[in-house]
Amino acid sequence: AGAKVIHMVDLDGAKSGSRVNAAIVKEVAEQSGMRIEMGGGIRSMETVESYLSIGIGRVILGTAAVKDPDFLKAALETYGEKIAVGVDLKDGLVAIKGWTETADLTAFDFFRQMESLGVKTVICTDISRDGAMEGTNRGLYRELSEKFSIDLIASGGVSNLEDVKALAAMGLHGAIIGKAYYIGAIDLRQAVEAAK
């Protein structure tokens, strides 16, 4: 359908902190010919290295980026743009540990910190919209994209072609399409075309 990047999350790994689905991820990397960004339970340099060594293009640090800034700094120093940060937002606050806790950190404070550390790419999920098929939080993404010079990728609630067009018009770096693709609400070929 013309997509260039696959966004993958090891949900088992997010719970256990180990690379539960590494064999499948490796197979997709080898056979798809696409750039893969991988998240879920990446909490050590060893895990970062192992994913990058099997051909993953970019790894996403989530809770670890909030809870362990030294790890984030080390990963950025070593791998630069191959490191992205994934942040989940709930009511304007950063949510961690699989959405079960909110850190005492606003979205804007978090983005400010990421920018000062030199993070290039942030994948931002508005939990309230994720999987709800109610449209994406355009106001949030507009505000974040205007305030920060980070490559912002919208995630959560990208439900239709209008969402894709609106996010592209804002100049966002990208959008992650999940449920809307699986249930046929978005034609991927059209979405890729609209995002160009």
Image: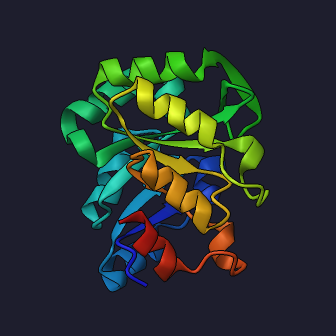
41 shown above or below 109? below
71 shown above or below 20? above
| Quadrant the C terminus occupies | bottom left
- Give coordinates of residue 92: x percent, y percent: 68, 25
Q: In the drawing, does residue 167 fall left or right of residue 183?
A: left
Q: Nearer the viewer, residue 189 or 74?
A: 189
Q: In the drawing, does residue 165 fall left or right of residue 80?
A: right
Q: How is the image coloured?
A: rainbow
Q: In the drawing, does residue 54 fall left or right of residue 111?
A: left
| Quadrant the N terminus occupies | bottom left
Residue 21 seen in render? yes
- Give coordinates of residue 135: x percent, y percent: 71, 54
- Give coordinates of residue 15: x percent, y percent: 66, 48
- Give coordinates of residue 55: x percent, y percent: 27, 67
Residue 19 seen in render? no
95 shown above or below 44? above
Q: Nearer the viewer, residue 37 or 150?
A: 150
In percent of the image, x 71 and y 52: which residue is there? 130
Question: Within the image, what quadrant is residue 54 found in?
Answer: bottom left
Q: Nearer the viewer, residue 47 or 148?
A: 148
42 shown above or below 21? above
In percent of the image, x 43 and y 23: which residue is there? 147
In percent of the image, x 58 and y 54: which residue is there? 13
Q: Nearer the viewer, residue 98 or 182?
A: 182
In percent of the image, x 44 and y 57: which residue is there? 38
**Number of residue marks:** 0
